[in-house]
Image (cartoon, grey):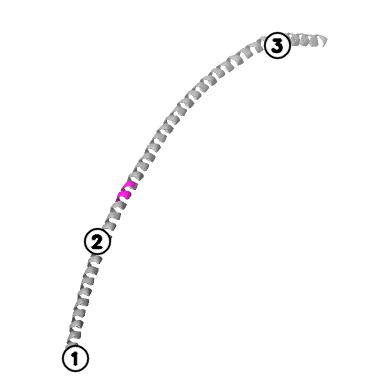
Amino acid sequence: MTEKNERMRDTLDFTTKSLTALVEKGSKDLERLKYDLHELVEQKTDAMNRMFESELLNVRKRYQEACQGVVDAKESINAAFRAKVRTIKEKSAVFFAKLEMKLEENNKETVAVSQMFREWQETLQGPTKAYEAKFFTLQTALDSAEN
């Protein structure tokens, strides 16, 4: 039995050594796989970060271009607005200057017409006043002679 025990012990030792070697090899493989997985995850993370940074730069660039476009549009609209306001002011000034000249001309014509009317009135009323004065004198003389 000793021989049988010895064989069993040898078999057990061999199996134990084999299993231990396999477990150690499995552990090493597992560690290597964990390290490889960790490296792979880091590479993917770095690649995603680079891609994200690249896209972020593109978005910033487009945003800045859009902002500049808005600023340029604002400036051009303000310039056009100022030019149109200037034109309106000039046209308004010309209009009111013409209006003022026309009013002065109308005032002069009104004064001239009024003066002509007074002269015409004097022409028409002058003989009437003279006639009334003569009539009054005659009537006064008649009234005096009757008394």
Q: Is residue 59 left or right of residue 132?
A: left
Question: Front-most of 107 and 119?
Answer: 107
Q: Which residue is mark 2?
A: 39
How packed is label 1: few (under 14 Cα within 10 Å), some, or many (20 or more)? few
Q: Nearer the viewer, mark 2 or mark 3?
A: 2
Q: Secondary structure at mark 2?
A: helix
Q: Is residue 31 left or right of residue 59?
A: left
Question: Front-most of 13 and 91?
Answer: 13
Q: Amino acid at mark 1?
A: Met
Q: Secondary structure at mark 1?
A: loop
Residue 31, how many percent across, how many down? 23, 68
Whether pointer 2 and pointer 1 mark residues with C-beta atoms closer than 8 Å, the reply is no
How packed is label 2: few (under 14 Cα within 10 Å), some, or many (20 or more)? few
Which residue is outermost to the right?
146
Residue 83, how many percent across, how many down? 42, 30
Residue 144 placement: quadrant? top right
Q: Which residue is mark 1?
A: 1
Q: Earlier in the sequence, mark 2 or mark 1?
A: 1
> Relative to 28, does residue 107 appear above or below in the rendering?
above
Whether pointer 3 and pointer 1 mark residues with C-beta atoms closer than 8 Å, the reply is no
Q: Earlier in the sequence, mark 3 or mark 1?
A: 1
Residue numbers of the magenta segment? 53-58
Residue 13, how many percent across, how many down? 18, 82
Q: Secondary structure at mark 3?
A: helix
Q: Amino acid at mark 3?
A: Lys
> Relative to 119, does residue 25 appear above or below in the rendering?
below
How many numbered discs?
3
Q: Amino acid at mark 2?
A: Glu
Residue 107, how many percent across, how many down? 56, 19
Q: Which residue is mark 3?
A: 129
Q: Nearer the viewer, mark 3 or mark 1?
A: 1
